[in-house]
Amino acid sequence: MLRYETDLRVRYADTDQMKFAYYGVYFEYFEQGRSDLLRSVGLPYATLESMGFLLPVIEAHAEYKRSAHYDDLLHVVTILPARPVARVRLDYEVYNADRNELIATGYTIHSFLNAQTGRPTRAPAVFLETLDAAIADRSSKHTRKNP
């Protein structure tokens, strides 16, 4: 398992007419956590793409427990629960950081695609090796990024 934690603030543009964070923006929060996790292990999306691989979302799910509001500090926990093969699943927990209150959970599933052919492929060896090294290095540590 690999875990990464990211803090971010709810922007005014993230809120709807009811002054809550719009439900669809949580997928952007998930994306931020996912991007930060990959970057933290040395595999940002740009690197994967330059190696000829794409990671499109093929499934996404969110459950909303509480509302987030403008300027709330959110704590996004991104978890890679298992070593990927042809697909990778990432789980997410979103907390109101000031109250340490769980406000949303979810997951995304991504398929590895060959960028030239657009066809599904297995996870590239460098991806798996990099994740294995990161998991071994962080076996019991948590890494946190502050904005």
Image (cartoon, grey):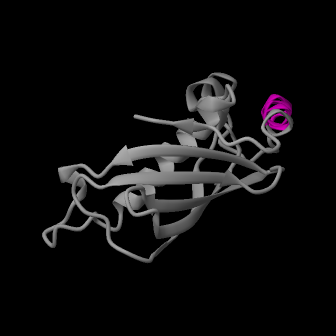
Q: Indicate the quadrant containing the C terminus: top left, top right, bottom left or bottom right.
A: top left
Q: Position of residue 25 (x, y in %)?
A: 35, 58
Q: Position of residue 75 (x, y in %)?
A: 46, 52
Which residue is pictured at 45% across the width and 35% down the height? 146
Q: Is residue 106 left or right of residue 85?
A: left
| Residue that protrudes farthest toward the front in the picture | 99
- The answer to whether 91 is drawn above or below residue 1 in the figure is below
Which residue is pictured at 44% across the width and 44% down the height? 7
- The answer to whether 9 is drawn above or below residue 89 in the figure is above
- For this rendering, which residue is in front, 90 or 54? 90
Q: Is residue 28 left or right of residue 91?
A: left
Query: What residue span does the magenta drawing correspond to?
Result: 124-134
Q: How many marks?
A: 0
Residue 129 magenta: yes
Q: Position of residue 145 (x, y in %)?
A: 51, 35
Q: Position of residue 128 (x, y in %)?
A: 83, 37
